[in-house]
Amino acid sequence: MVTATSGSATNGTAVLEAPGQVNVPAPIIEFTTFRLEGVSPLICHQWSEKAKKEMLDKQMKKASAGKLAKDPDKDFRESLYEMPDGDGYGFPAIAFKASMVRAGTYLDLKMTFLRGAFHIDGELIRIEGEPTMREDMVRVGMGTADIRYRGQFMPWAVDLPVRYNARAISLEQVANLIVTAGFSVGVGEWRPERDGSYGLWELAS
């Protein structure tokens, strides 16, 4: 219950009346966990310390020291998101939320509405699976070819913790967003949103 003061306007002048009681329904916050099982490789690409330093040096107008020799194993390791406790690897929770929000466009739900209707708890979602190194030819800058070494998971699975406002969105709608996101949007590098077919999942039965 919220106390409010109502009023009216006469000739542009507000007239205050007696305070009244306004019923403001509180959100109904529900919590659930969905089990997602990967159907295509999940490719990780965390910003490496080297890449962040090069970017900062460029912004600070520092002279470039030139390209260092590639270290495939180091690049592979730095592409992964290590869990804070040092036990295993994860993937950003915000990536799964962004994927579900984008999936709403396939279901006639507004992205601005979905951003506040549910949240994914935590910063990193633990990945069940072991990473392997992949080597890819990519185009960077002005079409220059480069070789990238990144980590991928296949098979992989995650338990996705979701908080949602049951007044705004139903459990069935949340599940539908997850299913659609797993088929149409994905997460990670070369997902469908980036002209690929990686980072896709199915909802475990």
Image: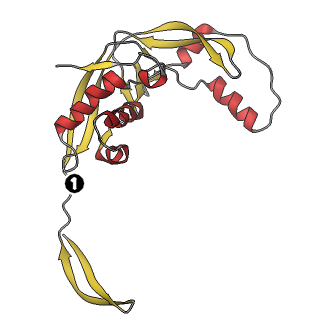
Quarter of the image with the N terminus is bottom left
Name the residue located 32 percent from the left edge and 37 percent from the top edge.
104
* In the displayed structure image, the side of residue 12 where residue 52 appears, left or right: right
Q: Secondary structure at mark 1?
A: loop
Image spot of residue 53 (x, y percent)? 68, 29
* Residue that badge 1 annotates: 27
Above or below: residue 159 compared with residue 100: above
Question: Does residue 94 appear anywhere in the picture?
Answer: yes
Q: Amino acid at mark 1?
A: Pro
Name the residue located 66 percent from the left edge and 20 percent from the top edge.
140
* In the displayed structure image, the side of residue 75 where residue 123 appears, left or right: left
Name the residue located 21 percent from the left edge and 37 percent from the top edge.
173
Quarter of the image with the C terminus is top left
* In the displayed structure image, the side of residue 71 where residue 205 appears, left or right: left
Above or below: residue 7 compared with residue 51: below
Front-most of residues 125 and 40: 40
Above or below: residue 166 compared with residue 148: below
Front-most of residues 95 and 193: 193
Front-most of residues 74 and 12: 12
Image spot of residue 33 (x, y percent)? 23, 31
